[in-house]
Amino acid sequence: MKNTCSMMLAALVFVASGSAFAIEEPSNGGTVARVLSYTTYGNGDVAVALSNITGKICEGYWLNKADPGFQANLAMLVAAYHTKNSVQLYGETTLKWAGTGAYFCKLTLIDYRP
């Protein structure tokens, strides 16, 4: 019984530790300065840079064509770029994009501010 409890506790710690290190960082907001769309890199990755780098870690954000919500997110980013409306982007700091030397975080949320 004691061995089973120890194994269950170890499994719980392992599962909880995965989410404990996942940190979502918000930008302070700004206009979309660049939208880079790759045809083959990452099977269709899109990278986004704001007019000002405001995060502690994230210098930009990226999303992949296979992501749920990709089309809606891309449409929001392109609309924000053309209208120069402010957006606040949130990124997963533990998922760095390999497509640049800068630290681009995996995009998790777009807060569109018309």
Image (cartoon, rainbow, N blue to C red):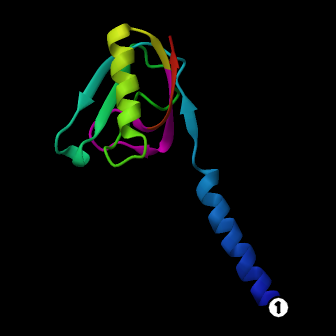
Amino acid type assigned to the residue bearing label 1 in the image: Met
Residue at 82% from the left image edge and 88% from the top image edge: 2
Q: Does residue 19 lie above or below 36 as drawn?
A: below
Residue 61 in sight? no
Residue at 37% from the left image edge and 39% from the top image edge: 70
Residue at 35% from the left image edge and 42% from the top image edge: 97
Q: Main secondary structure of the magenta part?
A: strand
Q: Does residue 29 lie above or below 71 as drawn?
A: above
For the residue labelled by badge 1, is the local secondary structure a helix, a strand or a loop? loop
Residue 97 on the magenta segment: yes
Q: State the image coordinates of residue 41 (x, y, percent, origin top left).
A: 20, 44
How packed mark 1 is, by other alpha carbons closer than 10 Å (few <14, some 14-19, many 20 or more), is few
Q: State the image coordinates of residue 92 (x, y, percent, origin top left).
A: 50, 41
Q: Is residue 37 left or right of residue 16?
A: left
Q: Report the front residue among 73 and 5.
A: 73
Q: State the image coordinates of residue 65 (x, y, percent, origin top left).
A: 31, 44
Q: State the image coordinates of residue 8 (x, y, percent, origin top left).
A: 73, 78
Q: Quadrant of the N terminus?
A: bottom right
Range shown magenta: 88-106
Q: Does residue 58 lie above or below 39 as drawn?
A: above
Residue for badge 1 = 1
Q: Report the front residue among 17 and 67.
A: 67
The quarter of the displayed image where residue 40 is located: top left
Q: Does residue 102 lie above or below 16 as drawn?
A: above
Q: Residue furthest right?
A: 1
Q: Report the front residue among 98 and 81.
A: 81
Q: Residue furthest left?
A: 40
Q: How many marks?
A: 1
Q: Is residue 14 left or right of residue 72?
A: right
The quarter of the displayed image where residue 102 is located: top left
Residue at 41% from the left image edge and 32% from the top image edge: 73
Residue 31 in sight? yes
